Amino acid sequence: MSRKYFGTDGIRGRANGLITPELALKVGQAAGLAFQRGDHRHRVVIGKDTRLSGYMIEYAMVAGFTSVGMDVLLVGPMPTPAVAMLTKSMRADLGVMISASHNLFEDNGIKLFGPQGFKLSDDVERQIEQLLDEPIDKRLAQSASLGRARRIDGVHDRYIEFAKRTLPRDLSLDGLRVVIDCANGAAYKVVPEALWELGADVVPIGVEPDGFNINKECGSTSPEALSKKVREMRADIGIALDGDADRVILVDERGHIVDGDQLLAVIAQSWKEDGRLSRPGIVATVMSNLGLERFLKGQGLDLVRTPVGDRYVLEQMLSGGYNLGGEQSGHIILSDYATTGDGFVAALQVLAVVQKLRRPVSEVCHRFDPLPQILKNVRHKGGKPLDDSDVKSAISDGEKRLNGHGRLLIRSSGTEPVIRVMGEGEDRILVEDVVDTIVSALGQAAA
């Protein structure tokens, strides 16, 4: 059974287009019914990022959950990993994050977490989808059993304390000048304060959300502003989060970008040396650079690959017993601490290595030379461009040309109408030509 509403990371789309108050209300009702297990009073934690549409979706979901008898705890703008953590620590039956992650303000989305703080399995999402398309009038709560809703104060302090405890108690960031870009998103309050409490000289940017400027020319998907600020302030390091703070990209003291693959390499080597890796390897996706795989092999570590999506990384980590995994895009999962990607906690692990080695970030965070990797996106208006005969032929020809000297990965995005074409190999000119040929064929098929 194919999924109608859920993509690779919850439900996402244009606010008041796909993500309407009606849909949000139904999701609240359906998810609420799916997670009513037992006779206890059920509760749900709802957090959000800073998009204008967050208010609309939040209150619609409150109506949905309370109508099926669930109490609602509203925590306001908070990072996605904080909502996952709070869901478990507050012993809620369900957690909700209202966010479209790294997308611009026009989009929004709904991410759901189970009582242990993990994203839902495909099977549970299918159960919710089935309820979404069924009449549930007869399953609504009786008047006396309706849920209540209230806002919870002090949750920012809980997350700050949680993040700080992922570092040794005697480790201080004293002497480090850190530029932090919060993407005008969910972390705009908690992360600068946490860095300050850890002793860093903090230079915050992207901390003035207005409902419209989330991820706009800032954050992990647009790190140019961070690079500029790091050079201007002569900072030691720059940290860029995305709109809901579940991914991170770093910038070294020269303003050069450090992606998720390098971060995984830094943490993996550090944790191996400290005996903290639960297995001799890590988990990453098919997008991670071949250079990372070769580096890890030199360290005696395996790289287990999964499909794109941090949920698949986590599933493999849990089934294989790994405690470190992530994506090139900056989703880093440290399962000793968190149940989902946490951009800030991942950054803290790297900062700990920087403080330990007392070397510039440009040295600490350059563990391998990545192979040339070209990634291009082709936007389409629907249909199945990948089924076009000319596209299939271009892909087949490209694979033959790269045979033994690189790899191709062509996939549809799970969050937007885009086909991503990635080529990787030792010969950049060859890789670029192969990718461009496939992109051209896709463009014609999409038109």
Image (cartoon, grey):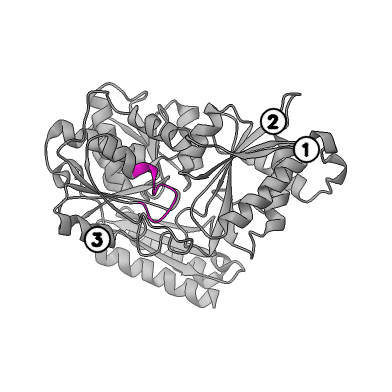
The Cα atoms of the two marked residues, 1 and 3, are separated by: 63 Å
What span is colored magenta in the figure? 182-191
Report if residue 186 lies within the magenta region: yes
Q: Secondary structure at mark 1?
A: loop
According to the picture, the residue beneath numbered tag 3 turns out to be: 427
Which residue is the extreme one toward the right? 138
Q: Under tag 2, what secondary structure? A: loop
Q: Which mark is residue 424?
A: none
Disc on the earlier residue, 1 or 3: 1
| Figure disc tally | 3
One can see residue 298 in this view: no
Nearer the observer, 97 or 338: 97
118 or 68: which is nearer to us?
Answer: 68
Dot 2 amino acid type: His
At a point 36% along the width and 54% down the height, the residue shown is 207
Q: Amino acid at mark 1?
A: Leu
Q: Position of residue 211 (x, y in %)?
A: 48, 61
Give how far across and how far down residue 394 sits, in percent: 45, 68
Q: Which residue is mark 1?
A: 146
Q: Quadrant of residue 396?
A: bottom left
